[in-house]
Image (cartoon, helix red, strand yellow):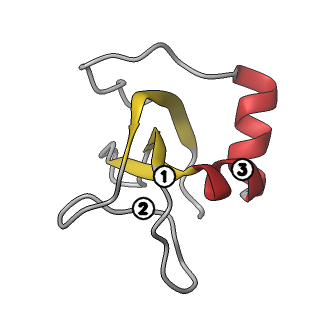
Amino acid sequence: MSSPILEIRPLFPAVAQAEGRACSMTTTGHCDAVLVAEVFVQFADGTVPRWLVCGDWLTRHPKAVEHIKTRGFAEPSNERPAAR
C-alpha cells in the first residue's frame, strides 16, 4: 500500500463479511474474518476511499501498525476525513 493512511476508525459493532462488504485490504488469498475497522487513505489524485479491514490486516500491516502507534484510532463518524 503506497497511499498514506489518514484515519483508522473502529467499527462498533464489528460486522461479518457479506456480498458487497469484504475485507478491502486482503491481497493474498481469501479472507472471511470479521471486519473490525474502516481505513481511509489518500490517493495521489486527492480522493479518499473508505476500506473495511479485518483484525489480521489491522495488526499485521506495517503501515497500519505504525499509524495506530503514532496516531491511534479516530472516533467513529459518518463524515469522510478531508484530504491533506
Image coords of residue 27 (percent x, y): 54, 78
Mark 2 Cα-neighbour bin, 10 Å: few <14, some 14–19, many ≥20? many
Image coords of residue 12 (percent x, y): 41, 25
Q: What kind of residue is marked 2? A: Cys
Q: Which residue is mark 3?
A: 63
Q: Which residue is mark 1?
A: 53
Looking at the image, which residue is at 58% across and 84% down? Answer: 28
Q: Is residue 8 shown above or below 63? A: above
Q: What kind of residue is marked 3? A: Lys
Q: How many marks?
A: 3
Mark 1 Cα-neighbour bin, 10 Å: few <14, some 14–19, many ≥20? many
Q: Which residue is mark 2?
A: 23
Looking at the image, which residue is at 50% across and 61% down? Answer: 33
> Which numbered mark, 3 or 2, is in the foreground of this view?
2
For residue 65, side relative to residue 30 (left or right): right
Looking at the image, which residue is at 35% across and 52% down? Answer: 16
> Mark 3 and mark 1 in contact (Cβ < 8 Å)?
no
Q: What kind of residue is marked 1? A: Val
> Mark 2 and mark 1 in contact (Cβ < 8 Å)?
yes
SS under mark 3: helix
- Whichever of labels 3 and 2 marks the residue nearer the N terminus, that label is 2
Image coords of residue 18 (percent x, y): 24, 62
SS under mark 2: loop
Query: What's the CA distance linking mark 3 and mark 2?
Result: 16 Å
For residue 59, side relative to residue 2 (left or right): right
Q: Which label is found at residue 42?
A: none
Query: What's the CA distance linking mark 1 and mark 3?
Result: 13 Å
Residue 32 occupies which quadrant of the picture?
A: bottom left
Q: Nearer the viewer, residue 11 or 64?
A: 11
> Mark 2 and mark 3 in contact (Cβ < 8 Å)?
no
